[in-house]
Amino acid sequence: MDSTLGFETVDLSEFFTEEEKSAESAPTGIVVFTDKQQSLIDQLNSKLTEIHYNHFEQFEKRVGDLQKLAAAIANFPSLLERADLTVGSRTPQSLIESLINSTREGDTTLQLPSKATLGKGFLVAKLHTFASLEKLARQANLDNQLVKEFHNETVSMMFLLLAEDVYLNLIKDTSLSIDSRWQLATSLLLLWEHRADQNISDISPVLQSVWNARAQLAPAFGTMMGTSELMTMTFALDEQWVTFTATKLSDDDVRMAMEEFLFGISYEQITKLKSLLREKGISAIGRNEVSSYLGEAVTTDVSMDYRDFFQQYSIRRDNARVRNRLHIPGPHKTLEDHFICFVMEKNNEKQEKDASAEK
């Protein structure tokens, strides 16, 4: 048994060649609660019991319902094992190959395994549960640190939803090596199977810090460059982000994706606004003037709400997919696509370097 997750370890060697494997073995089954999440729930449970809080029964029921949902999903065939389906068999290798070779555009929900779709619903339910528990802890005037930790876990779940999109985007990116796409597809299978992902656990605090910094910035709509804002953001964040911006901003797609992220409007709107300001000889405008210049209602302010992060990401994602499909100018990937791909590349380089050092 895996002591961390509590699931049986499954050997993947039957399904992957040595070149194709990104891991020798992996446990199967949804991670209902990580050790940290379970600890938070136990702490909240204990405190609510002590003070006889009137929402205690609802708290227990919500957690129990989530566990039942995970148990129901566990009845569907594992994505990490050979499965005999109604019309044939499926292996992890065949599933990964279908993801990599797929040329389908648009919403692929009906092409995805049932367990993947159901698991996404579980993750949304779990996210809402932790958001509710955060509010419950706050209403009960419990320790601020406990409230903050519930919030951070909720945000991390949002980034798991985001990661699923990013993996699906990058798997189809033929500019990446087949080995990279295979690894991304394997990571996606593991995410679908467990609704947990170590890569995103490492990356989400950085992206959350980027969003928090972005929410506090006032982009320079006069120059439409955002240079000072980017530098302010960079200095406030960790080494990974500093390295990413230093090495990748020379890439046009990364630069355009960064502009969309910073200004909170699309590449097309940024281009139009730059042209209008240049024609009128205007050096600077405020956030509240952007809509009137563009002739359409746009929101350039950003809240600290994680739901706003996901909504803004989804708009940029959809726009990037359209540009890529129609072969029109503008970023074909989101900033999140570029950053997650960069971090995974760096992790691979480190693993290869460590492996060489051990020989």
Image: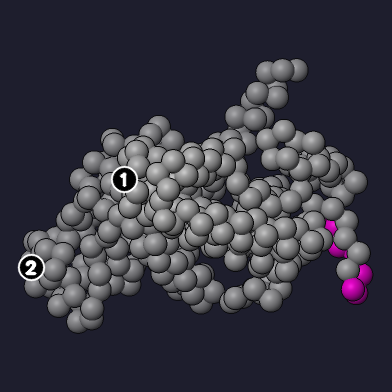
284 with respect to 246 (left or right): left
- Mark 2 neighbour class, 10 Å CA radius: few under 14, some 14 to 19, many 20 or more: few
- Mark 1 neighbour class, 10 Å CA radius: few under 14, some 14 to 19, many 20 or more: few
Any magenta on residue 119? no
162 versus 276 height, above or below: above
- Residue type at mark 1: give it: Asn
122 with respect to 343 (left or right): right
Q: Which residues are magenta?
A: 86-92
Coloring scheme of the render?
one colour
Residue 6: x percent and y percent? 73, 40
Q: Nearer the viewer, mark 2 or mark 1?
A: 1
89 versus 352 height, above or below: below
Q: Nearer the viewer, residue 32 or 305?
A: 32
Residue 267: x percent and y percent? 34, 67
What is the CA distance from the residue labelled 2 to the residue labelled 1?
54 Å
Which residue sits at x=47%, y=53%? Answer: 56
Dot 1: what SS? loop
Which residue sits at x=90%, y=74%? Answer: 87
343 with respect to 136 (left or right): right
Q: Nearer the viewer, residue 150 or 265?
A: 150
Query: Which quadrant is home to the C terminus?
Result: top right
What residue is pinned by disc 1?
A: 141
- Residue type at mark 2: give it: Gly
332 with respect to 228 (left or right): right
Furthest-bottom residue in this view: 295
Q: Nearer the viewer, residue 353 or 218?
A: 218
Quadrant of residue 188 in the image? bottom right
Residue 116: x percent and y percent? 68, 63
What residue is pinned by disc 2?
A: 281
Sequence-first disc among 2 and 1:
1
Callout count: 2
Residue 268: x percent and y percent? 32, 72
